[in-house]
Amino acid sequence: MSDWFVPFKYNKNSYIRLFCFHYGGGSASIYRKWAKDLIDYVDLIAIQLPGRESRFHEPLLDNISDIVNELSLDFHNYLDKPYILFGHSIGALISFEFTRILRKKGMQQPKSLIISGTKAPQVPLKKLPIHNLPNSELIEKIREYNGIPSYIIENKELMDIFLPIIRADFCISETYSYYSESPLDCPIMALGGLNDDTFDSQDLLKWQEQTSTSFQYELLPGDHFFIKSSYQKVINIVNKILYKEITQFITLN
């Protein structure tokens, strides 16, 4: 298997695969605990970007085109079963562009795209970029996101490790350039935090423009990292979508 794909739950008898894309500053392991809470007959595979965990010594990537191009190279190995994509924050943006590049290559599309914690891609960035700030200013901005424990932020040795990763990940989203294509033909579910002030919640609803089929959205308690504070609600939503796809698969086969 490619280093890009980290299996946390894998079963030859599964009906569908769930691929999860981590948020900025994160890694594949944020989805490890999902394995015990997802319904049966689902493979859980997290995407691991270079420069973290088992890929720590690989160069960081800060361009979304490079990421989705490389990620697509070995993806044909996973297309023997239907699949769903889930991504949070920059992970959502990467999963969206990944779906579009798969379409360009004529590869099987996801049964559903679950977008979490980010504005629609066609909406211009409304905040000043922070990826090129000096370390001290970047750290202060990071505090506002409330995603990294204070004991890490206040530990210089740990921040020396994390800052380049965080900087590269902010660069991914802040230098992203949207280009118009026809809407995707898979359903989109968009999730947002009720108290997420990193973007306008109305811009979450504009994901509807990116699908030609069904669109749903749900706002959950919490800030930008509501996938932690509203963990069970997120899992319930994901499981409901997985169950629907598995039921349809069994009915048709």
Image: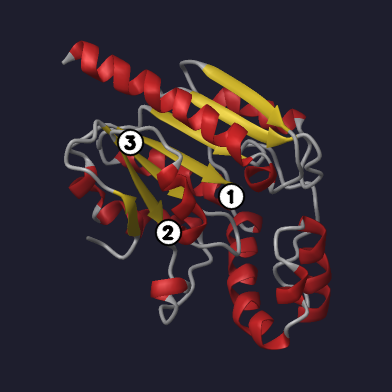
Whether residue 23 sits left or right of residue 225 in the image: it is left
Q: CA distance from mark 3 to mark 1?
A: 19 Å
Q: What amino acid is found at the position of numbered circle 3 in the picture?
A: Arg
Q: CA distance from mark 2 to mark 1?
A: 14 Å
x 56%, y 62%: residue: 26
Q: What amino acid is found at the position of numbered circle 1 in the picture?
A: Ser
x, y percent for residue 217: 62, 24
Q: Earlier in the sequence, mark 3 or mark 1?
A: 3
Frontmost residue, 234 versus 84: 234
Q: Earlier in the sequence, mark 2 or mark 1?
A: 2
Whether residue 90 sits left or right of residue 140 in the image: it is left
Q: Are marks 3 and 1 in contact (CB under 8 Å)?
A: no
Query: Which element type, helix, strand or loop, lies under badge 1?
Result: loop
Identify the residue position indicated by label 3 in the image.
103
Q: Residues within 10 Å of mark 2 (few under 14, many from 20)?
A: some
Identify the residue position indicated by label 1 in the image.
177
x 46%, y 40%: residue: 37
